[in-house]
Amino acid sequence: MNLPKLEIANLKPKLPIIQGGMAIRISMAELAAAVADQGGIGVIAGTVLGIEEIKNEIRKAKAKTDGIIGVNIMFAAKNFKKLLNASVEAGVDVIISGAGFSRDMFTVGKNTNTPVVPIVSSLKLAKISEKLGAAAIVVEGGNAGGHLGTDENSFNLVKKIVDKVNIPVIGAGDVVTPPDMEKMFALGVDGVQMGTRFLASKEAAVAESFKKLCVKATSNDVVKIMSSVGLKANAIKTRFTDLIQAGEAPPPANCTDCLKHCTKNFCIRDALVAAKAGNMEDGVFFTGAGIGRIDQILSTKEIFQEIKEYFSN
């Protein structure tokens, strides 16, 4: 099977692969630059970063590679527009955003000639995105990692959207291995977004125990929780996800009002920070439904080597 050619406005990555933006400082400059260097689009997750921090990470990544560097910022972030402007100022190549829908990002994109790629979970949002000027869309189903906009399987969702818009469609959710990629490409998408596979990479900025948990976990270990953001999310079953599902998770100890809307039943940010540090007691370990197909921690270069070898046969 020949890989499709992904073009997002004037951006033409060598490979049609976008690395998913994993927030709470997991996909930072090192991972994003490593992916971009291999011919994909490397993405820095900017949701919880400060203004200067996001600028520094983008500049650091761009200093490491001549490849394409994007940023993923959740619409739910309170300083969403400031982070968008800071990213453009730092020279980011593409803006990606999900967990809500914003017209602000299209305005920033048009004013700065920066391609904007919304993450959508319905045909309606896909069409609105195209109308507002999206350069492409990421169609993400309910089997993706982290916060979700739908319960629908990603492959079924892509089938409903791929032929209904005239901009590039990138499939996301349960795309972990080269055969998963082939299955998604067979639906007619222009590219894929992969987060979970890069979570268990040497460059991902998480504790080694988190990466080992990803290797050990099976797909049966993935549970759906209701995040304090107000969206469902996929995570590996732990003591803390049990507390969330039982409605017994502790309320925030030091709320900083980092989100536009939050139930304040518990702090998802603190839980994700704990997971990043490998805290098995208090962490929420976001991951996609396909985690069971990861059997080893690889470098980004090794991940891309496997992909290239598979599609060259």
Image (tube, rainbow, N blue to C red):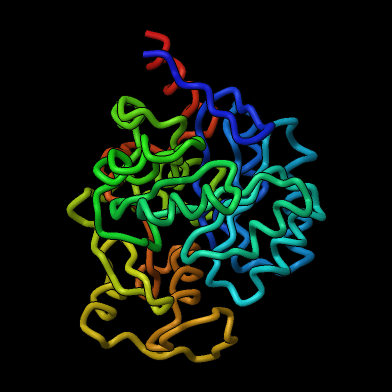
Direction top: furthest residue: 313
In this picture, is 222 found above or below 201? Answer: below
In this picture, is 177 found above or below 110? Answer: above
- In front: 228, or 302? 228
Q: Quadrant of residue 135?
A: top right
Q: Is residue 173 left or right of residue 7?
A: left
Number of dots carrying numbers:
0
Q: In which quadrant will I find the N terminus? A: top left
The residue under the point 78% across, 56% down is: 56
Q: Is residue 209 visible?
A: no
The residue under the point 35% across, 38% down is: 175
Q: Position of residue 98 (x, y in %)?
A: 49, 59
Q: Is residue 6 left or right of residue 231?
A: right
The residue under the point 29% across, 55% down is: 142
Q: In which quadrant will I find the C terminus? A: top left
Q: Is residue 288 left or right of residue 75?
A: left
- In front: 163, or 73? 163
Q: Quadrant of residue 258?
A: bottom right
Q: Position of residue 141 (x, y in %)?
A: 32, 51
Q: Is residue 10 left or right of residue 16?
A: right
Q: Position of residue 199 (x, y in %)?
A: 45, 47
The residue under the point 60% across, 35% down is: 8
Direction left: furthest residue: 220
Q: Is residue 194 visible?
A: yes
Direction front: furthest residue: 131
